[in-house]
Image: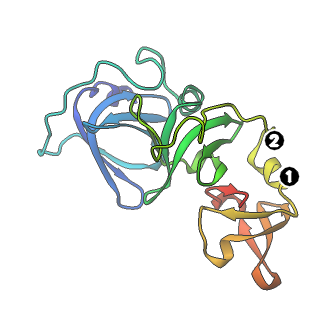
Amino acid sequence: MIEIKKSIGQFVHLHLLGNAVLKGTLIDVGSDLIVIFNGVDFIYLPLNHIDIIDFSNEDDEDIVFPKDVPIGDRDETLSLRKVLNNARGTLSEVYISNDKSLHGYVSNVMNDYFVFTTPVYREVLIPLQHLKRLIPYHQNEKIYDLTDGVFPLKPTTQSYARTFEQQCKKYVNQLVVFDLDNAPHKIGKITKVENAQIECVIARNKTIYLNFNHVKSIHLP
């Protein structure tokens, strides 16, 4: 990371796992994430989802280095957990895959997951390991042009378990949706969470088992 820090201010191409490519000016480097600015948005990316960091590409673009960052302080050491805590109550877009994103705000940050509140899905639980990137909204930008009365930015009063596994166990006998997906095997009633497997009864009473570590998100419909 020390070598990458020396390149702050340079134009960079980021090749992500899954063949997506992002490009922009390198703004900051933390212990487990980096920040780039693409001329419009600041993008916070966990390092574990970046395959290649390339400064050698010749098609550099003229992007003015911004004076301020939307989350945290440029002088402090960044980490994913610190960014998420600082982002609480700030409208943002988060990706749980390269082509699937949510709009809302971080409402809670737990040990190994965070709660993302949206006007569409309400509270969505996302394991930290599956957050692909976070993009803060611009100042005074609204979400779906909703008024504060329709979608207020306020702390949730609901209590959550400290770990993602414990919270999933609290959802036993409840209908849930996995990974924001409407595929038949992604919607069902949790019946057991044990040994890194989630036992789930889907439509027509068929029982399936999901790999706990591959669940990207979960929410109640």
Q: Nearer the viewer, residue 73 or 92?
A: 92
Spatial CA distance of label 2 from label 1 is: 8 Å
Q: Secondary structure at mark 1?
A: helix
Q: Decide: few, some or many residues near mark 1? Use Cα within 10 Å; few <14, some 14-19, many ≥20.
A: some
Figure check: 109 above or below 206: above
Q: Residue at x 67, y 35 (%)?
A: 109
Quadrant of residue 192 within the rendered picture: bottom right
Figure check: 44 above or below 188: above
**Residue 60: % across, % down:** 14, 40
Horizontal side, residue 154 vs residue 99: left or right: right
Horizontal side, residue 127 vs residue 86: left or right: right
Q: Which residue is mark 2?
A: 161
**Residue 219: % across, % down:** 69, 56
**Residue 140: % across, % down:** 41, 29
Q: Secondary structure at mark 2?
A: loop
Horizontal side, residue 52 vs residue 181: left or right: left
In the rendered image, which quarter contains the C terminus? bottom right
Q: How many discs appear?
A: 2
Under mark 1, the amino acid is Lys
Q: Which residue is mark 1?
A: 170
Q: Answer yes or no: do the residues labelled 2 and 1 have beta carbons within 8 Å? A: yes
Figure check: 193 above or below 62: below
